Image: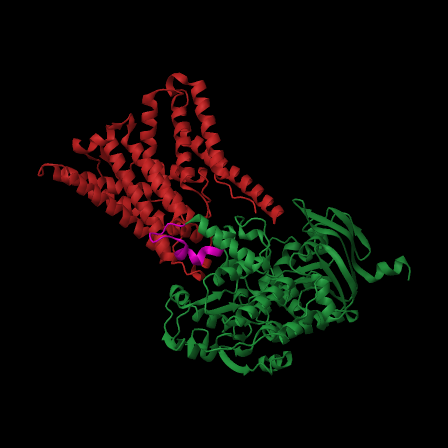
């Protein structure tokens, strides 16, 4: 019997792309790229959409998708921000901040459970369900914030946005921790394995005695929870929250998940793969910023091009893999 | 007769056809000659190259080597359009009809499209359609939506449509798979009538009784090579199985040697009803194999689902080891020791793109994981290894996706998954559907061995041979009711045919 490979090809491929990008950036723009400040900015920016991409990835592995992550993040950011604003005056100590964080996480989880309920019990296609709920979450956020930016967040909280631990921004440490915990859950636990099975064949899952609805709801709940964390990180970084902040992230999170090797039909993908894809994309994005001649107008064009290119490359790789498997059988 | 005469009597002559896909040789030089006006059977196990040769004849694939002649005319390159023009029509298993259109539209469309008309005329449609169904005396409401019709009618629509295109050779790919006995009879009458009108039929099948009933001559393929081509009258049933598989089977002997070790009552079903069947009662003992035989729509599948917690009974009792049980979901059934090998292994049984390990251990995750739900990879691989070896699954590596396996090996994986849960009652719905003869033989032997060791087994099937070979007893279901029971002594093909017709 052939020994199973320890590291899968996809991770290797992503690491090669990552190294190549870093090398290109270092060689062509050494003055801008190789700077501690640049790295700190990069990891701070990517932590937010990186977190959401992990959530989107889990939902995609389960055979669905989550388009509402950005708006869950905004909603939870607004709720936490408003709570902090209102409670800061009347309290001494930082207890209210922890309360606000807890409420934000809870709201995120509830939003996710709601998505999961639509997808599992009501069997609404995930694409439509989360497109609907994204509008709903944004609507709620607009109503409670009266359509304006929530700002004036207490310094006691926004401090986290600037704190460095061993020169590493807290946001990035949170992203790393979440990545490690999720990697473990997805690859080593019963629940994680069942997400893959649900994403492969929802019908066979029923016959194997796996509770489809429970798995799906938990997957979307995790996505909601991580989105809430992203919302809190963003609240600390930009010192404000808004109902329609970061709309372009939705597209980016999907791009990252697919680039990271998540199969759009479900059943395949890994958390470390997504995390590496986050870094790749951030480097590409920062690198483009170092060319003042490349106008922001080109940004969408480039992202669109990258997504389509990744899809085509995946298609070719999968086709080759299938041919190889056919030969082996 | 000279060369000229031969050419006149052949409608199709394919010689030395070779075809490979990504280095896999699907056809290694196959010959197929079909005489004008005959019913020719093309037989062979799954994967022997039957479908590939059909697709080559109909112009869908281009052969790597070999020559095709239709009615004496050579086709160096055959395209689908040329094949249709030459009078070759294929009735595929899914019939390629448009379910959302009416019978009339389905029949007339091709014709209208072929004439390159841009405007449609309902009156003309009706004329074409009426003419088409008359050819085979097919009575159907032309304005009915095709999706509302039974499978057999869809097939007849496909045949009518083929005749509209002046079909000279109709290729039917496993046409009886989804039909009831009665419908098969009607189809055979139509085939006989077509033959009378000078249409040649290539009948693709692996079902022994059908082949002997309908065909004039036969070509058997194995592993992409010709095994034999001869008039059907020159071949016996035992030879047929041997030619298909290259193995000798002595089923009569194994059945005689079947040890009986029937023990205490394991499962009792009393007046059970659920959507799909009504008032079903039977008993099942340890060490016994009970056959449930019935056609599609007889309630056999629903019964198996109800006994596995996937269909809620409306009335009646299920008694397991003397205690009445309720089965609200699969987990409860699983814990009680009931296992179901579902009817359709591709959609209901397997996670095709996932590894063999995952497919085998899926129902044992609770036991293989620690108390907080962390899975041990080592334990999973050991468990899988045990069943891959124990069931004789042929694979190089059980980390490979299960879709790389043949039908028979896939079925062994599904079976292994449930045997791993050490069930007390094992229900198998169509245990050998789409499985080659060799694996079928292995699976039947395994079931007998499991029964000897004390497992209570229910085999749900529409295959009379299978029930006769494996079961101690059989109940017959029709339109949702149990219509008879046959004891072991009386279990024979004749008795089953009598009881189910």
Q: How is the image coloured?
A: by chain
> In the figure, the red chain has which letter?
A
> In the figure, the green chain has which letter?
B
| Rendered image quadrant of residue B474 | bottom right
Magenta-colored span? B359-375
Q: Residue furthest top?
A: A31
Location of residue B211 in the rendering, given as x and y in whole percent from the top left corner: 70, 69
In depth, the one of A154 and B235 nearer the eye is B235
Location of residue B341 in the rendering, given as x and y in whole percent from the top left corner: 50, 64
Evaluate whether residue A63 shows in this view.
Answer: no
Residue A232 on the magenta span = no
Indicate left or right for A74 with A260 as reference.
left
Indicate left or right for A238 with A314 as reference.
left
Location of residue B161 in the rendering, given as x and y in whole percent from the top left corner: 65, 63
In depth, the one of B137 and B499 nearer the eye is B499
Q: Residue furthest right?
A: B2
Residue name at image x 57 percent, y 75 percent = B471
In depth, the one of A172 and B179 nearer the eye is A172
Q: Is residue B261 above or below residue A253?
A: below
């Amino acid at each position: 019997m052939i020994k199973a490979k320890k590291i899968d090809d996809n991770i290797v491929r992503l690491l090669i792309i990552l190294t190549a990008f870093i090398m290109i950036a270092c060689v062509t723009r050494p003055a801008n790229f190789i700077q501690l400040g640049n790295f700190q900015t990069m990891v701070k920016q990517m932590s937010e959409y990186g977190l959401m991409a992990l959530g989107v990835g889990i939902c995609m592995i389960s055979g669905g998708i989550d388009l509402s992550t950005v708006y869950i993040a905004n909603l939870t950011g607004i709720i936490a921000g408003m709570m902090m604003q209102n409670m800061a005056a009347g309290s001494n100590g930082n207890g209210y901040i922890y309360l606000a964080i807890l409420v934000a996480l809870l709201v995120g989880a509830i939003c996710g459970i709601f998505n999961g309920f639509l997808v599992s019990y009501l069997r609404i296609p995930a694409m439509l369900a989360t497109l609907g709920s994204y509008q709903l979450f944004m609507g709620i956020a607009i109503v409670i914030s009266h359509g304006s930016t929530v700002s004036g967040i207490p310094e006691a909280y926004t401090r986290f946005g600037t704190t460095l631990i061993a020169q590493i921004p807290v946001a990035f440490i949170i992203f790393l921790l979440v990545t490690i915990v999720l990697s473990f859950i997805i690859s080593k636990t019963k629940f994680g394995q069942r997400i893959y099975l649900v994403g492969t064949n929802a019908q066979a899952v029923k016959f194997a005695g796996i509770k489809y609805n429970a798995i799906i709801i938990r997957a979307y709940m995790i996505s909601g929870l991580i989105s809430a964390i992203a919302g809190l990180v963003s609240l600390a970084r930009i010192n404000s929250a808004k109902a329609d902040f970061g709309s372009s992230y939705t597209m980016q999170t999907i791009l990252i998940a697919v680039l990271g090797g998540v199969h759009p039909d479900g059943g395949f993908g890994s958390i470390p793969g997504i995390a590496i894809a986050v870094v790749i994309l951030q480097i590409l994005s920062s690198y483009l910023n170092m060319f003042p001649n490349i106008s922001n107008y080109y940004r969408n064009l480039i992202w669109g091009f990258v997504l389509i290119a990744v899809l085509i490359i995946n298609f070719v790789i999968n086709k080759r893999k299938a041919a190889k498997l056919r030969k082996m059988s | 007769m000279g060369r000229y005469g031969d050419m006149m009597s052949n409608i199709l002559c394919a010689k030395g056809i070779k075809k490979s896909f990504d280095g896999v040789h699907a056809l290694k030089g196959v010959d197929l000659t079909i005489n004008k006006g005959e019913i020719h059977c093309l037989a062979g196990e799954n994967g022997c190259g039957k479908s590939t040769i059909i697709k080559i004849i109909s112009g869908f694939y281009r052969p790597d080597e070999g020559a095709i002649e239709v009615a004496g005319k050579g086709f160096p390159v055959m395209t689908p359009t040329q094949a249709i023009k030459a009078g070759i029509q294929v009735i595929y298993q899914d019939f390629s009809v448009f379910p959302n259109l009416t019978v009339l539209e389905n029949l007339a469309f091709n014709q209208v499209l072929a004439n390159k008309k841009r405007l449609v005329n309902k009156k003309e449609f009706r004329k074409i359609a009426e003419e088409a169904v008359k050819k085979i005396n097919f009575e159907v409401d032309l304005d009915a939506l095709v999706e509302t019709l039974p499978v057999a009618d869809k097939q007849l629509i496909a045949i009518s449509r083929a005749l509209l295109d002046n079909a000279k050779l109709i290729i039917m790919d496993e046409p009886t798979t989804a039909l009831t006995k009665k419908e098969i009879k009607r189809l055979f009458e139509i085939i006989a009538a077509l033959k009378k009108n000078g249409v040649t039929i290539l009948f693709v099948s692996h079902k022994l009784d059908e082949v002997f009933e309908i065909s004039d001559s036969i070509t058997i393929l194995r592993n992409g090579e010709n095994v034999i081509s001869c008039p059907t009258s020159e071949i016996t049933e035992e030879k047929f199985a041997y030619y298909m598989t290259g193995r000798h089977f002595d089923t009569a002997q194994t059945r005689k040697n079947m040890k009986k070790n029937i023990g205490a009552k394991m499962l009792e079903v009393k007046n059970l009803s659920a959507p799909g069947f009504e008032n079903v009662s039977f008993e099942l003992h340890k060490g016994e194999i009970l056959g449930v035989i019935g056609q599609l729509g007889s309630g056999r599948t629903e019964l198996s689902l109800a006994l596995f917690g996937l269909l809620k009974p409306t009335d009646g009792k299920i008694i397991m080891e003397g205690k009445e049980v309720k089965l609200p979901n699969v987990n409860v059934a699983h814990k009680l020791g009931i296992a179901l090998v579902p009817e359709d292994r591709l959609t209901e049984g397997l996670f095709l793109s996932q590894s063999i390990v995952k497919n085998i251990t899926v129902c044992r995750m609770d036991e293989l994981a620690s108390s907080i739900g962390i899975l041990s990879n080592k334990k999973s691989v050991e468990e899988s290894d045990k069943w891959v070896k124990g069931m004789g699954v042929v694979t190089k590596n059980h980390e490979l996706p299960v879709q790389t396996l043949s039908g028979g090996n896939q079925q062994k994986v599904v079976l292994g998954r449930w045997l791993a849960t050490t069930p007390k009652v094992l229900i198998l719905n169509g245990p050998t559907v789409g499985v080659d003869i060799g694996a079928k033989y292995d699976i039947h032997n395994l079931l007998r061995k499991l029964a000897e060791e004390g497992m209570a087994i229910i085999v749900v099937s529409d295959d009379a041979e299978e029930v006769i070979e494996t079961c101690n007893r059989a109940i017959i279901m029709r339109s949702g009711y149990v219509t008879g029971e046959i004891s072991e002594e009386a279990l024979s093909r004749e008795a089953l045919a009598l009881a189910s017709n």
